[in-house]
Image (spheres, rainbow, N blue to C red):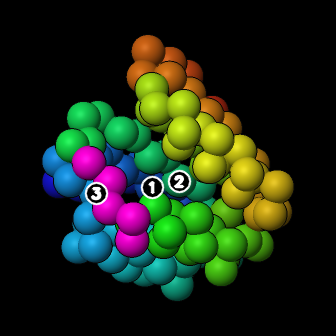
Amino acid sequence: MILDYDLADNTIAYVFDGPMDASTIEALQGQIERKLEIHARINVYLEDRGVEYFTLYSVIVGIIFPLQHYKRFNRVAMVTDRSWIHLLSTINNQFISGDIRNYTSEKRVEAMQWVSNS
């Protein structure tokens, strides 16, 4: 399931639980692309709140999609306790023009404040 929150006009937040599969990642892509139609650059808050499993497809898209829009992200907050996701976002941070920061679940409020204050 994707829970979608609007923190600010150019900032969107997604909280995931359940499987991270093709339908979930494609729904997320579509929502981000709709926001990019309105704004030149956006902020994104992504939180893993009990994702059951990740398919290889969702991981690959999660790496490639930000690279396809590398100039369009201002701030991205990744909230998860999975170190491998933090590693992937750190690698992506080298290739986008914005800033990706990793947070643990206990720092979710700090992440929301950071991502929406730009």
Asked if the magenta segment contains residue 30, the reply would be no
Mark 1 and mark 3: span between their CA atoms? 18 Å
The residue located at (82%, 55%) in the rendering is 94
Q: Along the horizontal axis of the image, is 36 left or right of 68?
A: left
Residue that mark 2 sits on: 44
Q: Amino acid at mark 2?
A: Val
Whether the magenta-drawn stretch holds residue 55 is answered as yes
The answer to whether the residues at label 1 and label 3 have Cβ atoms under 8 Å apart is: no
Q: Residue furthest front?
A: 56
Tag of residue 12? 1
- x and y percentages locating residue 98 in the rendered image: 76, 56
Q: Which residue is mark 3?
A: 20
The C terminus: image quadrant: top right
Which kind of residue does numbered mark 1 sit on? Answer: Ile
Element carrying mark 1: strand
Q: Which residues are magenta?
A: 53-57
Residue 109 visible here: no
Q: Label 3 amino acid?
A: Met
